């Protein structure tokens, strides 16, 4: 029982997640091609930058799909806690790529402003930017709906990535519109390109930082741990909680707790209580895939050892 919920449940739980992510990837491929072609032909640096942002969404879709499929593989002889951390490694690489791409876009836009080469983009940029904004908002709503059902954090992050792309497309629409309004506002398109680049860099930093934090076994928030401790203490016959420890394994959570019980309880009674605590924890949060419960007597002599323990 020490392995907790089998990681073989992953593929069953992630079918809807993979489906909506594949749908998003197909739409992103279309948007990348259209925005890049129109951005170059229409002379809009902002739309080219937005195409790069959609490219990051496409890569993000691939990372999510890969993580859902590979991360759901069961534990084996070489990976006792499964393969969920593969997704974190991929996200760190994605974060670095996004930061580099955003920096390149920003530098190109700055050079355009300094050289005075800014010019109003073509009118064909406007309908493409509007189409992108509507499409990405649709993807956000479809993805977040599935994420709320499956509870997968990477799907939530991917949904907000779609929403950020919708917002930047609205920025492109505004910048291009201003640049077309007056020759004196031609620089607005290049400025919008810088703003979009900043958004791309920020997303890259966020993805990389969060993945790195989880990769080095950062624990969930204190509020989460407090709520988990309160739930355990609410269980019948549980007297105390000691050394509650948690760590992320990818986007899943592994947990260990020392449970203080009445020392007069039999081994079987202690086992039953610990088993029920474990089931309750895993029902409370489906991300918890492994729980180790150590049973200890609540009252023990001063200076004595840790006492009898039972690992579940």
Image: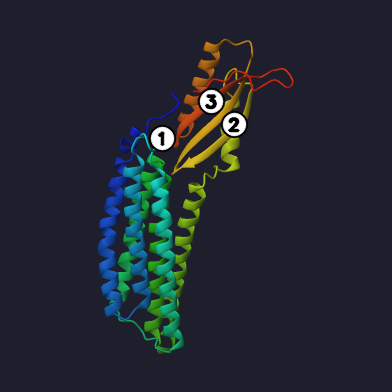
Secondary structure of the residue carrying numbered label 2: helix
Label 1 residue SS: loop
Gap between marks 3 and 2, in whole Å?
13 Å
Considering only vertical position in the picture, is 265 above or below 177? Answer: above
The residue depicted at 45 percent of the width and 61 percent of the height is 204
In this view, the mark in front (1 or 3)? 1
Q: Residue at x 53, y 18 (%)?
A: 273
User: What's the mark number on residue 293?
Assistant: 3
Does the CB distance between marks 1 and 2 fall below 8 Å?
Answer: no
Could you classify mark 3 by the number of other residues whose Cα lies within 10 Å: few (under 14), some (14-19), or many (20 or more)?
A: many
| Residue 156 appears in the rendering | no
Q: Nearer the viewer, mark 1 or mark 2?
A: 1
Quickly name the residue at label 2.
229
Quarter residue 118 falls in: bottom left
> Residue 70 occupies which quadrant of the picture?
top left
The mark tally for this picture is 3
Going by the picture, which residue comes out furthest to the front? 78
Of the two numbered discs 3 and 2 in the rendering, the one whose residue sits closer to the viewer: 3
Circle on res. 93: none
Say whether disc 1 or disc 2 marks the residue closer to the N-terminus: 1
Q: Is residue 187 above or below residue 146?
A: below
Residue drawn at point x = 33 percent, y = 70 percent = 129
Q: Is residue 309 left or right of residue 211?
A: right
Q: Nearer the viewer, residue 9 or 116?
A: 9
């Amino acid at each position: 029982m020490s392995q907790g919920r089998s990681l073989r449940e992953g593929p069953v739980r992630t079918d809807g997640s993979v489906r909506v992510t594949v749908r998003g990837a197909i739409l992103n491929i279309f948007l990348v091609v259209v925005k890049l072609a129109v951005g170059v032909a229409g002379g809009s640096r902002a739309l080219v930058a937005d195409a790069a942002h959609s490219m990051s969404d496409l890569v993000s879709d691939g990372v999510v799909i890969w993580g859902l499929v590979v991360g759901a593989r069961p534990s084996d002889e070489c990976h006792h806690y499964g393969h969920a951390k593969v997704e974190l490694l991929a996200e760190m690489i994605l974060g670095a790529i996004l930061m580099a791409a955003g920096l390149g876009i920003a530098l190109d836009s700055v050079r355009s402003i300094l050289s005075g080469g800014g010019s109003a983009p073509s009118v064909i940029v406007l309908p493409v930017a509007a189409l992108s904004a509507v499409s990405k908002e649709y993807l956000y709503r479809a993805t977040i709906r599935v994420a709320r059902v499956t509870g997968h954090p990477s799907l939530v992050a991917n949904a907000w990535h779609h929403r950020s792309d919708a917002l930047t497309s609205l920025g492109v629409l505004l910048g291009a519109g201003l640049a077309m309004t007056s020759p004196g506002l031609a620089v607005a398109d290049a400025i919008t390109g810088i703003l979009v680049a900043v958004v791309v860099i920020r997303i890259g930093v966020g993805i990389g930082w969060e993945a790195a934090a989880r990769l080095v076994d950062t624990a969930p928030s204190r509020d989460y741990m407090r709520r988990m401790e309160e739930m355990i203490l609410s269980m019948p016959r549980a007297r105390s909680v000691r050394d509650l420890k948690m760590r992320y394994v990818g986007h899943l959570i592994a947990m260990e707790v020392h449970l203080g019980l009445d020392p007069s309880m039999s081994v079987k009674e202690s086992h039953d209580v610990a088993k029920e605590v474990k089931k309750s924890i895993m029902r409370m949060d489906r991300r918890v895939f492994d729980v180790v419960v150590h049973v200890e007597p609540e009252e023990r002599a001063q200076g004595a050892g840790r006492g009898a323990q039972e690992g579940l």
